[in-house]
Image (tube, rainbow, N blue to C red):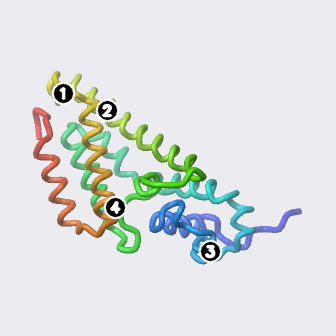
Amino acid sequence: MGRQREFDVDQALDAALCVFWRKGYEGASYTDLTQATGVERPALYSAFGNKEALFRRALERYYEHYMDFIPEALGKPTSYEVVAHILRGAVELNTRYPDRTGCLGIHGALAGSDDAEPIRRALIDARASGEALLRERFERAKQEGDLRQTANCVALAAFVCAVLHGMAVQAKAGFSRDILEAVVDQALSTWPSKTG
């Protein structure tokens, strides 16, 4: 019979998530991870596999526990409200924790070695999926008459993602919540919906 784990897997995963959020995938060393989790390297390997597997689990947890404002936003009645909810939610998340500003998903994909390419690719794919969901929601807004028939839903989704990604980088660079809220106000002032 195998030995029972002597640590809480969820707590260890949360601690690892914070390290990855603060330092990125490549910046997080095993020493950082073991110190933060309080779990020795062999036990971390046993529970999660390698560093890549641990990061993927941490990323899943990030999406589940911190990005819940996205699916909530997609259910809003107008495209303007969808975008406002997403952008304001991102500002709040990007600035909520002074020790880990910005977005785990954005920072993890900005740069990396060849060894980290699978992680970078997974993050790019996740962002592309999010952009596709936005595009589909904007297409629905067109069908419902909320967006003009001439609206380019591909460009609108890319625009929203560009603002999101830029704000994540700015938050990591120390931009204040007030400045990021002003960026949101500026982006929303250009929104092409018939309402809002």
- Per the image, the residue denoted by label 3 is 31
The residue depicted at 58 percent of the width and 55 percent of the height is 57
> Hey, what amino acid is under mark 2?
Arg
> Hey, what amino acid is under mark 4?
Leu
| Sequence order check, earlier mark of 4 and 3 | 3
| Sequence order check, earlier mark of 2 and 4 | 4
The answer for how far apart the CA atoms under marks 4 and 3 are is 27 Å
| Sequence order check, earlier mark of 3 and 1 | 3
Please state which of the two labelled residues, at mark 3 or mark 1, is closer to the viewer.
3
Q: Vertical placement of 141 versus 80: above or below?
A: above
The residue depicted at 48 percent of the width and 62 percent of the height is 24
| Sequence order check, earlier mark of 4 and 1 | 4
Front residue of this view, candidates 37 and 113: 113
- Binning the other alpha carbons within 10 Å of mark 4 as few (below 14), some (14 to 19) or many (20 upward) gives many
Q: Is residue 163 left or right of residue 8?
A: left
Q: Is residue 41 left or right of residue 119?
A: right
- Per the image, the residue denoted by label 4 is 93
The answer for how far apart the CA atoms under marks 3 and 1 are is 50 Å
The numbered mark at residue 151 is 1
